[in-house]
Amino acid sequence: MMVLMVLYFGLRIRGDGNINDALWLPDRTALRFQGSGIAYVDDLSISRLNRKVDSLTIEMVVRPGRNQRQGFGPLLLLHDGDDGRQMAIWQYKDSLIVMNGNDYNNARRWPRITGMHVLPPDQIRYLTITASKKKGSRLFVNGKPVAAKKDWCLRIPSEGRPLRLVLGNSVYGNHGWIGDIYGLGIAGKAIFSEQVRARYEKWVEDQSVPLLEPDLPEQIIKFNQQLWSRPSEADMVGSLLNIPSDVVALEKAVLSTPQAYFKLNRVTIADISLNIFGFVPLGAMLFAYLGSCYGFDGSRKWIALAFCGTLSLGIELAQAWIPTRFSTLLDLILNTIGAWIGIELLYRIRKLRGRDSI
């Protein structure tokens, strides 16, 4: 019974299950994400995307929702199979972060640009990101500059497997964002501040998303309502946008290490405690069972510990295929520590009572 309980809590689907809650809103011409959604293009090669461009403009019109999940919520990722090379635009609380790589908690001090408090909930924001070797990387919100890094150029991943575009989630399917995306454009050309402001003012005037206008001839990707619902032959990328019925894990993270995302807070402490103390009774009960059948000698401790460790390993390997779960090496270690605590506690108690055959 204890083993079944551990399997249930270890493998249960969290949240609202695996249902993909990304949906197209025709009346608002928006793609909505409600926390467990994902939309993606599996291979951008059909868009004739030049992955080695040395300048870049990204435009997005977004409306962040309320009750964002803790941690990072990706609005957009360009991913080639290696987290260390990905291009990521993501929300943390009410701030926007643009970077390459997976230094989410900034522990390695990799370059990034951060717009502090630029994404209040339920308010539409026109985001423009420009990058070039000469001027560095800049972030504009509603036509105004809010952050810049002159000595760093945001780049599209140019190596690895075919490039994926992912909206509203990570490639692992477990970092959902909440909000609406009204339009997206990526062009292989960096525009100037005056152009950024003019394009935003045009949007304010007639609510037409400027990124859909033909004044960026180097445009390499664009999505709008027409492409999402009625793709044309001239813009085949839209026909490749997948909104599956279930959330999918495009990449499998098996026994990942915690350096990229680990942050000591109340949620992390609670998770650590659950992983340890959840296996304490399992270790104790298994050792008690083996002892009652074969005697409480020291070798039974190692058999019980090996069983608990193997069970935890099996759970972590299975979690790699569940989009709402994480497969981490840290959980395996903590589970094993918890089992050892339970085994050792029972062993010591019996020894103190003199009821063993050690």
Image (spheres, helix red, strand yellow):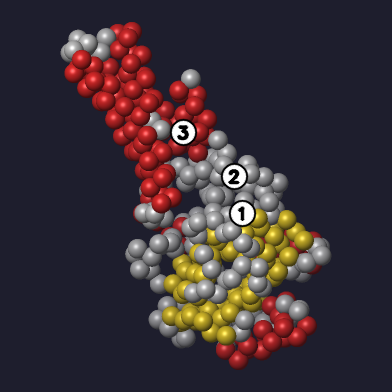
SS at badge 2: loop
What residue is pinned by disc 1? 35
Q: Position of residue 221 (x, y in %)?
A: 66, 70
SS at badge 1: loop
Q: Position of residue 322 (x, y in %)?
A: 55, 41
Mark seen at residue 315: 3
Camera sees residue 170 = no
Residue type at tag 1: Gly
- Closer to the camera, 239 or 66? 66
Packing grade of label 2 (10 A; few <14, some 14-19, many >=20) is few
Q: Nearer the viewer, mark 3 or mark 1?
A: 1
Q: Which residue is at a point 47% across and 86% down the rendered structure image?
A: 135
Q: Is the residue under label 2 in contact with that under label 1 (CB below 8 Å)?
A: yes
Answer left or right for 278 relative to 212.
left
Query: Does label 1 or label 2 sit earlier along the sequence?
Result: 2
Q: Quadrant of residue 42?
A: bottom right
For the C terminus, which image quadrant? top left
Residue type at tag 3: Ile
Q: Is residue 272 above or below residue 238?
A: above
Query: Does label 2 or label 3 sit earlier along the sequence?
Result: 2
SS at badge 3: helix
Residue type at tag 2: Gly
Q: Position of residue 281 (x, y in %)?
A: 38, 26
Q: Which residue is at a point 33% across and 33% down the rendered structure image?
A: 338
- Closer to the camera, 267 or 197? 267
Answer left or right for 74 relative to 277.
right
Q: Position of residue 38 (x, y in %)?
A: 63, 54
